[in-house]
Image: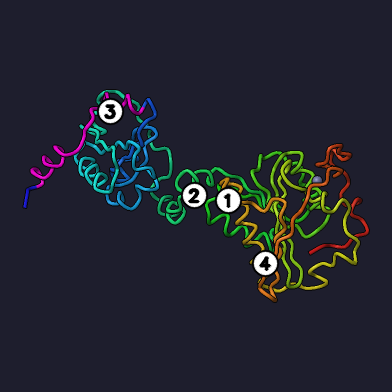
């Protein structure tokens, strides 16, 4: 059995190696996929800008995601060029056609004074806390950092707002605002703080119309949810992209069509289902992934345990988001909704 030194010599003779100068030329030309095979703590202390981090122990299982085309050049590096030499050999055995190892590794790269990117991302406790997210390719570290910087405003801390806030906080949303009670007096706060997403779990019409108008004027998507007895609904109102609440309900529905949960009741678990779905939509919007429920109303029937979907259209004559808006500043929402009862 060959010693480590002998095996290394043998492997280095079989693979292709590049010095730091040549590696930099290639990287500046944007040609290779650059893969850092060192451990997490080494990566955190600095790495080649644009490199992908795949610790040596995960190379075989994760390389296809980073470099799906085996004919594209892959440049591997570690600290001194030994681990990356073995990694290059492995990739060749996996069918990668143009693999090279950076001779002298990151140490030599730094010695040449070439650019180094410092890890400004998650510290160790946060990495442990959000480890499940970091494993999802669509989220990963960049996504988690986005969530940590995101600001979500919850309207209503009741049945819908409580489960939504629980999951949004657990997901690492950086700033959660919760407005309960009288939002009509809170319009200044909705403006002022630069929220990324509003989760609307309001239990009254004046608040819903106010939140809608504010969201249009400040270009903030609203994740809308409502519940009644065994039925729940979720949709996303994204200004300029899909309909808004007023496109669907230019005026508050008459009282007989809008009984409240206080009057008609609601199944205890339903707010949990709908509030969680609202949190799901808010996370997708904050991350910029998936297909948000824009122009789609998701209906949940707890009795049949069925989901249905209804398409929603923008109204070109909408008084707020239409082509010729007639409402361009805050109105007296309580008066506007007078005569209606509280919705679910
Ligand atoms: Zn509208």
- Mark 3 to mark 4 CA distance (whole Å): 56 Å
The answer to whether 75 appears left or right of 186 in the picture is left
Q: Is 339 in front, or is 182?
A: 339
The spot of residue 116 in percent (x, y) is: 35, 30
| Label 1 crowd bin: few (<14), some (14–19), many (20+), radius 10 Å | few
Q: Which residue is mark 4?
A: 307
Disc on res. 110? 3
Q: Is mark 2 within 8 Å of ligand 1?
A: no
Circle 2 sits in a helix, a strand or a loop, which is it? loop
Residue ID at (54%, 47%): 147
Do tag 2 and tag 1 residues touch (Cβ < 8 Å)? Answer: yes
The spot of residue 41 in percent (x, y) is: 31, 44
Height in image: 315 above or below 31? below
Residue ID at (26%, 33%): 106
- Mark yes or no: residue 190 visible: no
- Mark 3 to mark 2 CA distance (whole Å): 31 Å
Q: Is 162 in front, or is 327?
A: 327
- Mark 1 to mark 3 CA distance (whole Å): 39 Å
The spot of residue 108 in percent (x, y) is: 23, 29
Residue 6 part of the magenta-drawn span: yes
Q: Earlier in the sequence, mark 2 or mark 4?
A: 2
Residue ID at (69%, 53%): 223
Q: Which residue is mark 2?
A: 138
Residue extending farthest right: 339
Mark in the foreground, 3 or 4 = 4
């Amino acid at each position: 059995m060959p010693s480590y030194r002998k095996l290394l010599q043998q492997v280095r003779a079989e693979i292709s190696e590049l010095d730091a100068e040549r590696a930099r030329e290639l990287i500046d030309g944007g040609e290779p996929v650059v893969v850092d095979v060192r451990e997490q703590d080494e990566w955190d202390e600095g790495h080649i800008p644009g490199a992908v981090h795949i610790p040596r122990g995960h190379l075989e299982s994760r390389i296809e995601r980073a470099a799906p085309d085996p004919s594209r050049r892959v440049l591997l590096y570690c600290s001194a060029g030994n681990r990356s030499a073995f990694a290059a050999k492995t990739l060749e055995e996996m069918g990668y056609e143009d693999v090279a190892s950076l001779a002298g590794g990151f140490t030599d790269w730094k010695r040449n004074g070439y650019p180094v990117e410092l890890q400004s991302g998650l510290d160790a406790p946060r990495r442990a806390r959000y480890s499940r997210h970091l494993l999802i390719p669509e989220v990963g570290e960049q996504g988690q950092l986005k969530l940590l910087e995101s600001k979500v405003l919850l309207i209503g801390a009741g049945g819908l707002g409580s489960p939504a806030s629980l999951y949004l906080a657990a997901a690492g949303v950086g700033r959660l605002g919760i407005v309960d009670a009288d939002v009509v007096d809170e319009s200044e706060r909705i403006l002022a703080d630069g929220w990324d997403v509003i989760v609307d779990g309001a239990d009254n019409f004046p608040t819903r119309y106010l939140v809608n108008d504010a969201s249009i004027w400040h270009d903030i998507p609203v994740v809308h949810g409502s519940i009644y007895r065994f039925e729940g609904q979720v949709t996303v109102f994204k200004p300029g992209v899909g309909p808004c609440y007023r496109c669907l309900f230019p005026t508050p529905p008459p009282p007989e069509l809008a009984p409240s949960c206080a009057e008609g009741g609601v199944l205890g678990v339903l707010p949990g289902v709908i509030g969680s779905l609202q949190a799901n939509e808010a996370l997708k919007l904050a991350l910029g992934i998936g297909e948000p429920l824009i122009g789609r109303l998701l209906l949940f029937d707890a009795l049949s345990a069925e989901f249905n979907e209804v398409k929603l259209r923008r109204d070109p004559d909408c008084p707020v988001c239409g082509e010729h808006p007639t409402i361009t500043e805050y109105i007296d929402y309580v008066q506007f909704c007078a005569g209606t009862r509280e919705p679910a």
